[in-house]
Amino acid sequence: MILAAQTQGFLSPTGVEIAFLLVGLATLGAAVMTVTTKQLVHAALWLVVALGGLAVEYLLLTAEFIAWVQVLIYVGSVVVLLLFGLMLTRAPIGRSPDADSGNRPVALAVAGTAAAALVWVVVDAFRTQWIDLDGPAQGSTEVTGSILFRHWVLPFEALSVLLLAALVGAIVLSRKRAGNSETDPEGES
Amino acid sequence: MHLAYPAVLSVLLFCTGLYGVLARRNAILVLMSVELMLNSVNLNLVAFDVWLRDALHSGQALTLFTIAIAAAEIGIGLSIVLMVYRNRGTSDVDRLRDTAEGPDGTPDDPEAAAPAQRTQKAEATA
């Protein structure tokens, strides 16, 4: 560990570290805008920036397959789903002054305390650890596919059943009921 | 790369999401904050997988599973929010106080009458 600390300068960051830091700052800024902006649709668009920045971070960590899955699923479908949800619940376009609830100071205190404590612990614990990014890529599509279908097949298949159940559940939940009455038996099934 | 960079970034993203969950009022914005928290966990998993050079690559496999579960969660969550909106006319989590209790143990619903008047459904607000 001390050897590693000697070969890696603490205050002489490599290019990957600088890129990670810059993209991380952009991601964090977009995340903060997501949770603080008063315009609901803008929150979803800032979320796109944050999730895309995270995809770039995965690329920098040599996990390319995860990065493209992130782009496909999060930026491609989850945000679109959130935008649809905002529009179906008739969220106001423009500034809505009541986007934040009354317990905002408490939330700020809790989040600040948690951030301070966790950053302190994490920095103190991993001060002398370096990620070795050289060598073959850790998360290329070939590597990910082979481990996923060699060691993780059963969880993978179980997950597909879970996705099917979630799909059916979402359809059942969002169906319009046949009658106006809540106890209409035709709305069930 | 120093391990502290991804770890600290994921901590900060998690706390941003925590703030959003606690401070937001619209249910869909709360779901967005939950997505931020899940993504910070994903970043942590990927970083530690690359650091430990795990032979099974459990970090990346679990990240894929988390992404799939998050997609399922957002679908179910949004359909629940849509159903609540259809029944109550609001997606404001502060107004859904039917099962809330006051400090003395009695049912506490001072604002529950407003959304019930807007929709024609007779909710149990008495």
Image: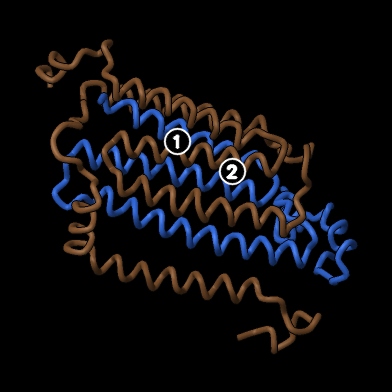
Residue A46 appears left or right of A166: right
Determine the residue located farthest toward the bottom in the rendered image.
A185
Identity of the residue drawn at 78% across and 47% down = A92
Characterize the local packing of mark 2: few (<14), some (14-19) or many (20 or more) Cα atoms within 10 angstroms.
Answer: many
Could you tell me how far apart the alpha carbons at marks 1 and 2 are, in whole angstroms? Answer: 21 Å
Of B88 and A110, nearer the camera is B88
Residue A143 appears left or right of B115: left
Image hue for chain A:
brown
Determine the residue located farthest toward the left in the rendered image.
A3
What chain does badge 1 belong to?
A: A
The residue indicated by pointer 2 is B21
Of helix, strand and loop, which one carries label 1?
Answer: helix
Q: Are marks 1 and 2 on the same chain?
A: no
| Chain that is coloured blue in the picture | B
Identity of the residue drawn at 31% across and 33% down = A60
Of A82 and A71, nearer the camera is A71
